Amino acid sequence: MSEAVRLLLVVAVALVDGDGRVLVSQRPPGKELAGLWEFPGGKVEPGERPEATLIRELAEEIGIAVEEPCLAPLTFASHAYPGFHLLMPLYVCRRWTGTPQPLEGQGLRWVRPRALRDLAMPPADAPLIPFLIDLLGP
Ligand SMILES: Nc1nc2c([nH]c(=O)n2[C@H]2C[C@H](O)[C@@H](COP(=O)(O)OP(=O)(O)OP(=O)(O)O)O2)c(=O)[nH]1
């Protein structure tokens, strides 16, 4: 039998603005993968529903309020990191209340889906980019 893996469930979201740009957030210094640009989100806590995780993380990290029906599943990442296997559903959201702010001091940028290819992102994220280009155009 192959070795047991630790499965880590993280939820992330592509927030899409009126121009079809997507919000990315820079991982702060001190965290693993620091400096890389990622989709907002975070780890699903024990007993928490994934959509509730996203709503909580979006409020904590960037100060916006999202209603659950505005979270549409798009695709997922499945990636073997050293020490754990990441499973990360990616949602799309076009409606929220408030203006995204860097409440944790992180960098925030709105980028066209094509421009995601030129950003330094975690390795798990690369396979997600074509889905966003298909959905939103380049
Ligand atoms: N949010 C997010 N995490 C990602 C992406 N791509 C990717 O590999 N990850 C990985 C990095 C981390 O190993 C994990 C997310 O963990 P995290 O440490 O940011 O989660 P969290 O916000 O709950 O963090 P913390 O409370 O433990 O500080 O998922 C992505 O696009 N967005």
Image (cartoon, rainbow, N blue to C red):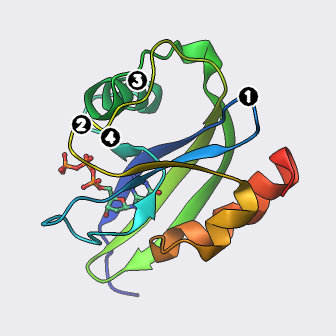
Q: What residue type is labelled 3?
A: Ile
Q: Does the residue labelled 3 lie within 8 Å of ligand 1?
A: no
Residue placed under numbered mark 1 in the picture: 18
Point out the frontmost of discs 3 and 1.
1
- The quadrant of the picture occupied by the N terminus is bottom left
Q: Dividing the image into four quarters, tell me where ligand 1 lies.
A: bottom left
Q: How crowded is mark 1: few (under 14 residues within 10 Å), some or many (20 or more)?
A: few
Residue placed under numbered mark 4 in the picture: 44
Q: Residue at x 48, y 70 (%)?
A: 121
Which of the two labelled residues, at mark 4 and mark 1, occupies the earlier sequence position? Answer: 1
Who is closer to the viewer here, 16 or 85? 16
Looking at the image, is 45 positioned above or below residue 63?
below
Question: Relative to 137, is 32 on the left or the right?
Answer: left
What SS does tag 2 mark?
loop
For the view shown, which residue lies furthest in the bottom direction? 2
Q: How far apart are marks 2 and 3 (CA)?
A: 16 Å
Q: Which residue is drawn at 77% across and 64% down?
A: 130
Which of the two labelled residues, at mark 3 and mark 1, occupies the earlier sequence position? Answer: 1
Q: Residues within 10 Å of mark 4 (few under 14, many from 20)?
A: some
Q: Distance between the residues labelled 2 and 1?
A: 35 Å
Q: Which residue is drawn at 24% across and 34% down?
A: 103
Q: Distance between the residues labelled 2 and 4?
A: 7 Å
Which of the two labelled residues, at mark 3 and mark 4, occupies the earlier sequence position? Answer: 4
Q: What residue type is labelled 2?
A: Pro
Residue placed under numbered mark 2 in the picture: 46
